[in-house]
Amino acid sequence: MSYQDNNVFAKILRGELPCFKIYEDEHSLAFMDIMPQADGHALVIPKYPAETLAELPLDYAAPLLATVQKVMAAQKSLLKVEGIVLMQLNGTAAGQTVPHLHFHLIPTHLSELKRHGAEQGDMGHIKSQAVELAKLLTQ
């Protein structure tokens, strides 16, 4: 595969598009999904230009998964949920809609998920959750 650097997540990484950032380090960025499948839905992406997990060098995988774990812990603490759906789709045939590797962290039960990318969420609510999650992640 050939990475396409005009995708929305690449633009977010370059600062060309805004996001509700909740965490960032040298390897990853975590932010809120503006088309959430459940309340508190967040995304974690690598700063490395990989379209799928198979294209991510192993030295980026551990720091990326560390960010996933941190965000999940913050979601559980803030939203008082027992479970978080962790979803990662590889390729359009699998339902991937943005050609940049990303993990969905969705605090809900699998049976309660809204359709992927179906509708935009309440931006004020998403922003306030982002602020609260970011506070937890910088403590």
Image (tube, rainbow, N blue to C red):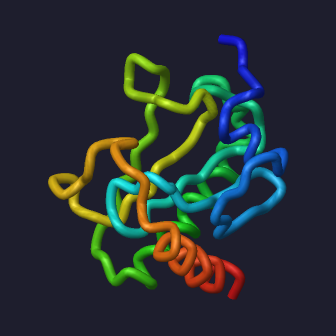
Give the percent coordinates (x, y) of residue 100.
63, 33
3 on left or right of 108? right
Report the residue at 44% width, 57% height from top. Answer: 105
Query: In this rendering, is residue 98 above or below 82?
Result: above
Give the percent coordinates (x, y) of residue 139.
69, 88
114 on left or right of 84? left
80 on left or right of 127? left
Dividing the picture into quadrants, the one containing residue 81 is bottom left
Q: In front here: 103 or 118?
A: 118
105 on left or right of 112? right
Query: In this rendering, is residue 50 above or below 16?
Result: above
Query: In this rendering, is residue 63 above or below 91?
Result: below
Q: In front here: 54 or 120?
A: 120
Report the residue at 51% width, 55% height from top. Answer: 33
Indicate the quadrant containing the N terminus: top left, top right, bottom left or bottom right: top right
Dividing the picture into quadrants, the one containing residue 70 is bottom right
Query: In this rendering, is residue 55 above or below 121?
Result: above
